[in-house]
Image (cartoon, rainbow, N blue to C red):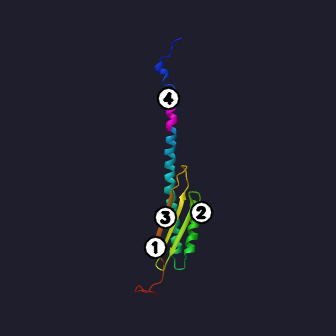
Amino acid sequence: MTAIPRRLRDDRGAATTQLALVVPVLLLLGMLVVQFALVWHARHIAQYAAVRALATARTKSGTAAEGRAQARRSLTALGGRILTAPSVAVDRTMTQTTVRVRGVVMAVVPGLHLHASGTVAGPTERLTAPGGGQP
């Protein structure tokens, strides 16, 4: 039998070693892409819930509690699993209504806890006289 040159035998297993080093890095990069896509989506969900809550709370007969309830319904319908532990804050005054929706984004990458929020504000509906004062 002929002997295999030593140079050819030294490369055996190199592809396996390279694969074992590269695949985890590629998987981590893929998971990071998915994680940041979820953050982007969660921000849109939070903003949508805040807009819906503002539309409810800023009406003349609306209340802050009704706004919070509307935001919770919107979050349940759209982001129950993506935006976890949501908090809704509605501040309603005579002239301005502000809604803040915050939450933790579902984790794809272990140990990475990112937050998403949405904030909107608008004037509170009220009756005024033609000169700008109260009727």
Asked if residue 20 is positioned above or below residue 121 in the image, the reply reads above
Residues in magenta, as a range: 17-22
For badge 4, the amino acid type reads Ala
For badge 1, the amino acid type reads Gly
Label placed on residue 97? none
- In which quadrant will I find the N terminus? top right
* Disc 2: which residue: 76
Q: Is residue 130 magenta?
A: no
Mark 4 Cα shell of 10 Å, populated few (<14), some (14-19), many (≥20): few
Report, in whole angstroms, how far the alpha carbon at label 4 lies from the one at label 3.
50 Å
Report, in whole angstroms, how far the alpha carbon at label 2 lies from the one at label 1.
24 Å
> Residue 69 at what x, y percent from top left?
58, 70
- Specify which label sits upstream in the sequence, 2 or 4: 4
For badge 2, the amino acid type reads Thr
* Disc 4: which residue: 14
* Disc 1: which residue: 122
* Disc 3: which residue: 118
The residue at the far front in this view is 111
Report, in whole angstroms, how far the alpha carbon at label 2 lies from the one at label 4.
51 Å
The mark closer to the camera, 2 or 3, is: 3
Report, in whole angstroms, how far the alpha carbon at label 3 lies from the one at label 1.
14 Å
